[in-house]
Image (tube, helix red, strand yellow):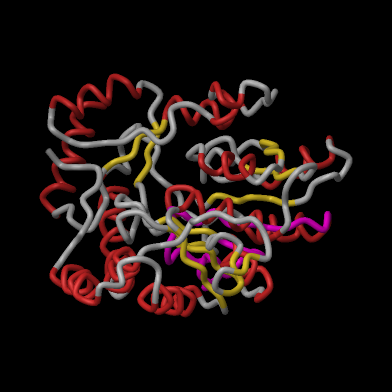
Amino acid sequence: MIPIANPDISDAEREQVLEVLDSGMLADGPVVREFEEEFATYCGIDHAVATSNGTTALHAAFEALGLGEGDRVITTPFSFIASANAIRLAGAEPIFADIDPETYNLDPDSVKEVIQKLDGDIDAILAVHLYGLPADVTRLQEIAGEYDAYLIEDAAQAHGATVDGDRVGSLGDVACFSFYPTKNMTTGEGGMIATDDEAVADRAARFVNHGRNEKYRHSEVGHNFRMTSIAGSLGLAQIEKLSEYIDARRENAARLTDGLADSPVTTPVEPEDRSHVYHQYTIRYEEREELQAHLDDHDVGYGVYYPTCIHEQPAYKDISTTAPVAERAADEVLSLPVHPKVADSDIERIIEVITNYVE
């Protein structure tokens, strides 16, 4: 079987973890602070706050921005449900706009239409950089500025991706990352908030640590969303290899795109101003279920992200939304193995299996 994901854990990660275990400081501590500094430098921003996972990063970011009850946040219905859940956990209201049919990211034109229907009453835009391709933040920045709204990046799948040479994490008021095992770099579980705003970073750091501003003094109500030092040590080892991982993913993606160029499947796009880091290599095909069965028969792993749009989930049945582009994508997309451990022979096999099927 060619797996859809296969995290790379080497001696470097093991050594980092053993150092933490030997130190006895397993919870939040200096190793996490070091990881925060390294990640902030990588993204090209001033501040990073580590959290326990990507969802807690999003939740804490909303709290740090002061978004809550009575506030409206426009986002995509075509993402993992955590994107919308974090909005609701902070007490704000998620509003869904449709997606671009080629990039699968939030469509700025749809965002503008939704805002106009709300008479301009919007407080933030949450742009998800889906599958590793940055959203059209240039236009979304303009829209956010026009309506005095925050622009928040959900960069959970896009570590290292760029827009006009600037890395995601530095493109909005605040950005959030995930380090889940399938991501382009992992800490097992873990998340990160990135921002140039010192006040936002300070509020986020307090919120993830019980609202604490000094030992046993708590200026506000918060959560325990802290990252462990074990996770931080994994992050320090992984970030050293992130550029190598991205290069491997992009090379594998290029081979897949070339090999599938003459087939009926639709391969990913990469707009000129953006670099795709291929957390997932996502194709689309109308007869997806038949293709899935064929891949199963030939031991080629795949993933379907996401088969049900968020606004169609039972948890969001109270929201009335029409998003036909997202709904069609949910019926047709399928992701193929593209991670760094996929061998050249695996790429050739994937291409051959799909080509033989569609022919």
Q: Locate residue 327: give its quadrant.
A: top right
Residue closest to the eye, 324 or 37 = 37
Q: Is residue 213 left or right of residue 283?
A: right
Q: Give the range drawn in magenta.
A: 147-175
Residue 322 in the image, given as x and y percentages of width and height: 67, 25
Give the dominant element type of the magenta stretch: helix, strand or loop: loop
- In the picture shown, does residue 47 fall above or below 274? below
Residue at position x 68%, y 73% from top?
A: 199
Instruction: Specify the quadrant that holds the C terminus.
Output: top left
- In the picture shown, does residue 326 fall above or below 274? above
Q: Is residue 359 visible?
A: no
Q: Can residue 154 be seen in this view?
A: yes
Instruction: Specify the quadrant that holds the N terminus.
Output: top left
Residue closest to the eye, 32 or 349 = 32
Residue closest to the eye, 252 or 98 = 98
Residue 100 in the image, given as x and y percentages of width and height: 58, 41
Residue 317 in the image, given as x and y percentages of width and height: 62, 21
Residue at position x 55%, y 45% from top?
A: 105
* Furthest residue toward front: 216
Q: Locate residue 148: give its quadrant.
A: bottom right
* Furthest residue toward right: 119
Residue at position x 18%, y 62% from top?
A: 9
Residue at position x 28%, y 65% from top?
A: 245
- In the picture shown, does residue 152 fall above or below 80? below
Residue 324 in the image, given as x and y percentages of width and height: 60, 26
Report if residue 149 lies within the magenta region: yes
